Amino acid sequence: MLLTVNNLSVSFGGLQALNLSHFQLEDKELRVVIGPNGAGKSTFMDILCGKTKPDTGEILFNGKPTHGLTEVEIAELGIGRKFQKSTVFSSLNVFENMTLAARMKKDVFSSLFFKMSPAFKKRIIEVAERVGLTSVLHQQAGALSHGQKQWLEIAIVVLQDPKLLLIDEPAAGMSDRETERTGELLLELSKEHGVIVIEHDMHFVRQIANNRVSVLVNGKLLMEGSFEEVRNDQRVIDCYLGRANAQLEKL
């Protein structure tokens, strides 16, 4: 099992944001986490990557506990996070952004005397091809389309060689074609990495949910199941999917 979570909880200002009794993810599994705003989805991601410390609970990643580790130490274990908001350097081109990301795995001393090897350059080109950025490698990141910026964010995480990718609302603001391409990319990445995706776009969820979907409501796990099981569960319909289900029925 790649990830195991037990009795994970955290409160902010006396309000419990997350109370997750159990969650598991297998290696090379893509899991979509859905739920209404305020359900605890982003808090869950924040705890997994070390940005937020839980009040109670246990996280085992690849059999190792993450309790007490810093964000950097958790990243070194193999958990990579792509946030919803862009963090690319707009004034640098795509290749330069990816170079910086790849160098982040090196220590400070090595970075000071960094010299690009043929293998290093080949790795960047391979990842760029994988995420669909080969044609814009030397284009300024600020001039990319919204979808291309999201793919660059994903490429930056992939270059960290994570075992688990945490992806926050990748389809937000994308065109239909960009959304479809992003779904294809995440399914491809799940052949080599564990992937957890937070998403609200149910058309996109249906595209990528090839295993279980987890539903969070009020910080708790309401249910897990296939996409069809989730979309037809009355509890999920009542608290979250009413309007989205109506839209899906039109397809």
Image (cartoon, rainbow, N blue to C red):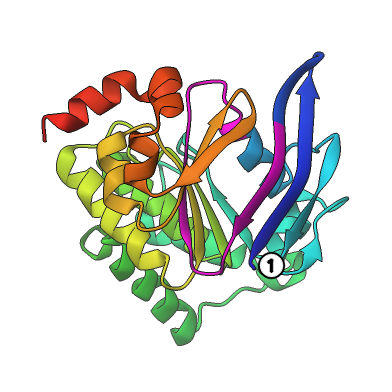
Percent coordinates x, y for residue 26 in the rendering: 57, 65
- Of all residues shown, which one is farthest toward the bottom? 118
**Is 78 above or below relative to 5?**
below
- Which corner quadrant of the image does residue 238 belong to? top left
Q: Which residue is depicted at the point 28% across and 25% down?
A: 244
Q: Secondary structure at mark 1?
A: helix
- Which corner quadrant of the image does residue 44 belong to? top right
- Return the residue at label 1: 112
Percent coordinates x, y for residue 156 in the rendering: 48, 57
Mark yes or no: residue 143 visible: no
Q: Which residue is depicted at the point 71% across and 64% down?
A: 76
In the foreground, 77 or 44: 44
In the foreground, 174 or 142: 174
Q: Is residue 28 left or right of residue 136?
A: right
In magenta segment, residue 5: no
Q: Which residue is depicted at the point 40% across and 41% down?
A: 90
Q: Is residue 18 left or right of residue 185?
A: right
Instruction: Tell me the quadrant of the picture where the N terminus can be found.
Output: bottom right
In magenta segment, residue 21: yes
**Is 53 above or below relative to 246?**
below
Three-letter code, disc 1: Leu
- Which corner quadrant of the image does residue 30 belong to? bottom left
In the foreground, 231 or 8: 231
**Is 156 above or below relative to 161?**
above
Range of magenta residues: 19-42
